[in-house]
Image (spheres, rainbow, N blue to C red):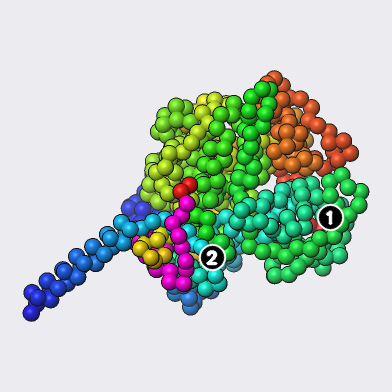
Amino acid sequence: MKAAVSRMIIAAGVILLAGCATSSSRDVPAVIVNPTPQSRAELSLAVQRALHSGPVLLADDALTQSSLLPIDRIPRRDSHGRLLNGLEIGRKPEVFRLVQSGSRCVLIHDDVDQLRQPLTATRCQPAPRS
Amino acid sequence: MLRTFAIVICLLGLSACGGSGGSSLGSPPTQNCTLMTCPQPTGWVQGVYPASSSFAQKCASPRSGIDPVTQRSYTDVKGTTTDENNFLRSWTNELYLWYSEVPDLNPANYSTTASYFPLLKTSATTPSGAPKDKFHFTYPTSTWEQLSQSGVSVGYGAIFFLVQASPPRRILVGYVQPATSSQTSTPALAAALVRGDAILQIDGVDAVNATGDANLATLNEGLSPTQAATHTFLVQDPGASGTRTVSMAAQTINETTVPVATKLPFNNTQVGYMLFNDQLATSEKELIAAVNSLQGVTDLFLDLRYNGGGYLDIASELAYMIAGSARTGAGSSTFEQTQFNSKYPGTDPVTGTSTTTLFHATTQNFSVPAGQALPSLNLSRVFILTGPDTCSASEAIMNGLRGVNVQVIQVGSTTCGKPYGFYPQDNCGTTYFSIQFQGVNAMGQGGYSDGFTPANQPSGPGAIIGVSLPGCSVADDFTHALGDPNEGLLQVALAYSTTPTCSVPPSGSSLASLKRATQPGEAVHVRSPLREMRILRR
């Protein structure tokens, strides 16, 4: 019985890995088309979920012009308008990628975990080549 | 990636008790300890610095519940103001660039962190007599940590300059974000604001002469709204004798960081003009497009007068795109070497990574997928248009190019002088900014704490003379659009490119008074309403 369970777990793992590989190999950089209030809310929630953050200020046309979505701290400035931290080293923005994977729009957090979140209320199409 | 600060605790933990930093000022030798090797702190002992981690998040008023930024529980525990001061004292001793110049003051003698932290810095001055450390401040963590899509902010789509912040005030429009395919209008565009517009009234209050707290509050709220509302402005267009009234409500704005990149016919050649205002993640994509559009130019006039910096990696990418592969060893040359205090000679103590930033020959995944070859202009010289807002990472562009023998010619006024940076550190809800590193170029040049100054800048009372670069001192010219060959800085720079002498800048005829003050501190600008500090003075 134990051996059978182990074999099932291994088989499931292989299937999962294969699934990941398949979906990755089918990934096509994508942009959102015809964003709606629902798709914007879905995108906002997906970003917050990935970053474990509160509300993130997004443009209404986020991911409609580019398949990349960099998220950063809101730049803060002093009374002279100069950035408080004008010499940023050692870190980069959090970057999300939108891909079309088969017929699905998937938001990928471009981090070590490569968290993939399907966006079911969003329409997307392959991004134009830059 | 946003939270690398904790690594310092691990790195500091590697140093054993008894380590000695010494002091160039003759104070007692310092001692760095860890939780494992040192007794728990019981009181202040001059020259002995327990690890900052032993005091971290011990708060006089611990935060409880869920952090709205991280959506996770706060980990603060009950402590005292002395604990918080002790944290600041030890953290400063660990990471402050000039830690040996900081007086060792008993943390228990200060009843607030707000009275203690300002003392934890050097009191030395620069050759101009200015404080060596001009960048020592705090910010509420809850605000500092808020996130947005890169390049997206709430505002009018215009930048206001307070050329004179106290009566008689002069508030001018510095520039207006242009329309793009994805943002066809902004409140400023709809109001037809243009560079040089003078703001005379805001919501019925005289913006030039009004005094009193209530009036100042009205003016500040109009320039920098804290609540969603429509504000009314009385403006005077450049050259107009009459005035007009416009109404604007702040909204989400997609900032274009390279609003202008254009070829200009000049002396039977094509030269390039590029306005570059912010070094954000989105700049990577915009800079590539700009440099591609400028291929073939014989000179570049890079306008950094309003560029307050940002990512050093973006600065490196642009510097590579100006200098090209040959001058940067195909991206193997040092763009900037980051120097921490003497305890960390070769490694970034916060990230544990190399302290060298090379000229990036490829994209870095800021807004373009990593690894794509960058275009370049392959220029041996560059004209940089500057002002007091040219700061930090934009000064690093100038310094980095000097380091690989690209001639940097400066036209404008002295830059802000910030070759320094920090890893902002939260403790108990306050984020502390304390200088931790400085940058030098491939030749070891740095230390421009008085900024860069065009060579012909006259000295005199109040004049700040920084590191001298060839070029011309010219006042900002609000009477022409940025990129207009007749605009004061660009006109002088164009002339200098053929004859290296400083011509007299255009007077601007009756609008000469609109030319901006050339000394730092005389003008204040406001670009992101809803997000700025209070600015008007009585």
Residue for badge 2: A34
Q: Position of residue B404 (x, y in %)?
A: 49, 28
Q: Are marks 2 and 1 in contact (CB under 8 Å)?
A: no
Q: State the CA–CA distance, disc 2 to disc 1.
A: 38 Å
**B261 up-or-down from B105: above or below:** above
Q: Position of residue B282 (x, y in %)?
A: 53, 51
Which chain does the numbered disc 2 sit on?
A
Residue drawn where x is 47% and y is 68% of the image: A122
Q: Amino acid at mark 2?
A: Asn
Tell me, yes or no, whether the highlighted magenta stretch contains residue B526. Answer: no
Residue B485 figure quarter: top right
Residue for badge 1: B235
Q: Amino acid at mark 1?
A: Val
Residues beneath discs 2 and 1 located on the same chain: no
Q: Which of these two is toward me, B152 or B91?
A: B152
Q: Is residue B359 left or right of residue B236?
A: left
Query: Which residue is the extreme one toward the bottom?
Result: A1
Residue drawn where x is 42% and y is 42% of the image: B372
Residue drawn where x is 61% and y is 60% of the image: B153
Q: Which of these two is toward me, B207 or B13?
A: B207
The numbered dot on residue B395 is none
Secondary structure under the numbered disc 1 in the rendered image: strand
- Image quadrant holding the N terminus of chain A, namely bottom left
Secondary structure under the numbered disc 2 in the rendered image: loop
Q: Which of these two is toward me, B322 or B409?
A: B322
**B143 up-or-down from B172: above or below:** below
Q: Is residue B132 left or right of residue B441?
A: right
**B473 up-or-down from A57: above or below:** above
Tell me, yes or no, whether the highlighted magenta stretch contains residue A109. Answer: yes
* Residues rendered magenta in the picture: A106-128
